Image (cartoon, grey):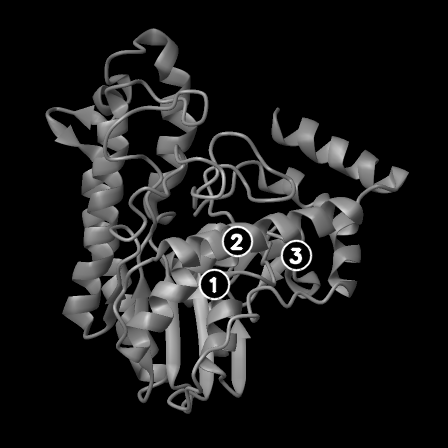
């Protein structure tokens, strides 16, 4: 999904780049049964796929802010594929599948360029940035809370002449996603295509304004927009003959309001050693990787307490290693520039 203050986040590159000398074995520590079904895997998507600020960064794609621990990397290891390309990019929408994407650190080619005739697995996480839906709701709604903390000013803002304008945009997005799937089929006719849904940001009930600064009545609105977006992704998968991976349902109890270690999504504050605001944490990326692996291999698509505890432990270790590598003065200065720049 759309990155908040994308330019500021790029200043982390110089600091976090030093972390790539640390080999991360956390996500591959669990033994997986050999899977020989897929050989050539291509991952397409936006920032919910690229995972900005989830340790550690992939140096060759700084403009897209890809993590080496995002769900495509974890899934590729679990499936034991022999060839893998992750071309996901923060800020991407469906048009960037076939058109170049400009970032402050250069222009990236269309993501479809990674597809080949012998690609046999494609994951696609896209849709939240189309027509500015995610950026609109996260940039607009928090600022409206002060006007009516107990009401639903965000819902009122996006309702025009009795119509939910964001819902209308999502309906259009569904058609775009279906077109993307059909385009993948043309380039990679043998591929299994998995459309990845978006995990929950808001809880089904309750509020946490210190984390998600929405008006109390707008939690239900945010939740409904997330539901509609995921339904659009699922409908597009059904219409185009692709597989839908539900991450919305299984992420119940792992929204941004959940305790540390349980939450899959970062709240309003950027965590320089964890995740960009309103974006998935490591735990969320691990959860999506696990759910996708289970969907592709026929296992039950659930998240166990043991799995969640393991991911939380891995996230803590990654953050510790990242913090240790950032103790030099240059690193501290870069972190300060990121923090102050991202808050402007």
Label 2 vs 1, first from the N-terminus:
2
Q: Nearer the viewer, mark 2 or mark 1?
A: 1
Give the class, few, some or many, for how many residues have Cα within 10 Å of label 1's Cα (few <14, many ≥20).
many
In percent of width and height, residue 194 lies at: 31, 71
Which residue corresponds to mark 2?
Answer: 51
Indicate left or right for 225 with 136 as reference: left
In percent of width and height, residue 257 lies at: 39, 32
Q: Is residue 203 visible?
A: yes
Residue at position x 25%, y 48% from top?
A: 229
Residue at position x 43%, y 43% from top?
A: 262
Q: Nearer the viewer, mark 3 or mark 2?
A: 3
Give the class, few, some or many, for how many residues have Cα within 10 Å of label 3's Cα (few <14, many ≥20).
many
Indicate left or right for 193 with 272 as reference: left
Q: Up-down: is 28 above or below 1?
A: below
- The reply to whether the C-beta atoms of the residues labelled 2 and 1 are less than 8 Å apart is yes
Q: Which element is circle 2 on? A: loop
Q: CA distance from mark 3 to mark 1?
A: 13 Å
The picture quadrant where one finds residue 158 is top left
Residue found at the very far right of the displayed protein: 329
Which residue corresponds to mark 3?
Answer: 56
In percent of width and height, residue 85 lies at: 53, 76
Q: Up-down: is 297 above or below 108?
A: below
Which residue corresponds to mark 1?
Answer: 71
Q: Up-down: is 214 above or below 63?
A: above
Front-lying residue, 69 or 89: 69
């Amino acid at each position: 999904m759309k990155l908040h203050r994308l330019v500021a986040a790029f200043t982390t590159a110089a600091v976090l780049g030093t972390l790539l000398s640390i080999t991360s074995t956390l996500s591959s520590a669990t033994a997986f049964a050999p899977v020989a079904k897929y050989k050539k895997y291509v991952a397409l998507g936006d920032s919910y796929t690229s995972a900005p600020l989830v340790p550690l960064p992939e140096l060759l794609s700084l403009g897209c802010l890809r993590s080496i621990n995002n769900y495509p990397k974890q899934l590729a290891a679990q499936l034991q594929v022999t060839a893998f390309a992750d071309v996901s990019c923060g800020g991407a929408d469906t048009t960037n599948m076939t058109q170049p994407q400009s970032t402050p650190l250069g222009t990236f080619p269309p993501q479809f360029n990674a597809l080949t005739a012998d690609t046999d697995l494609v994951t696609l996480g896209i849709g939240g940035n189309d027509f500015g839906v995610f950026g609109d709701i996260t940039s607009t709604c928090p600022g409206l809370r002060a006007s009516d903390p107990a009401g639903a000013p965000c819902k009122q803002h996006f309702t025009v002449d009795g119509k939910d304008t964001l819902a209308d945009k999502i309906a259009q997005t569904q058609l775009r996603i279906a077109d993307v799937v059909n385009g993948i089929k043309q380039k990679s006719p043998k591929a299994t295509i998995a459309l990845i849904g978006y995990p929950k940001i808001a809880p089904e009930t309750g509020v946490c304004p210190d984390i998600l600064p929405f008006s109390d009545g707008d939690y239900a609105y945010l939740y409904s927009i997330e539901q509609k977006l995921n339904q659009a992704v699922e409908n597009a998968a059904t219409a185009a003959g692709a597989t839908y991976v539900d991450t919305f349902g299984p992420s119940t109890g792992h929204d941004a309001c959940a305790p540390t270690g349980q939450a899959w999504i970062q709240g309003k504050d950027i965590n320089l050693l964890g995740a960009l605001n309103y974006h998935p944490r490591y735990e969320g990326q691990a959860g999506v990787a696990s759910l996708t692996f289970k969907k592709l291999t026929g296992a039950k698509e659930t998240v166990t307490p043991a799995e969640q505890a393991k991911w939380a432990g891995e996230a803590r270790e990654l953050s510790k290693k990242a913090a240790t590598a950032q103790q030099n003065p240059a690193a501290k200065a870069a972190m300060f520039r990121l923090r102050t720049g991202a808050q402007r």
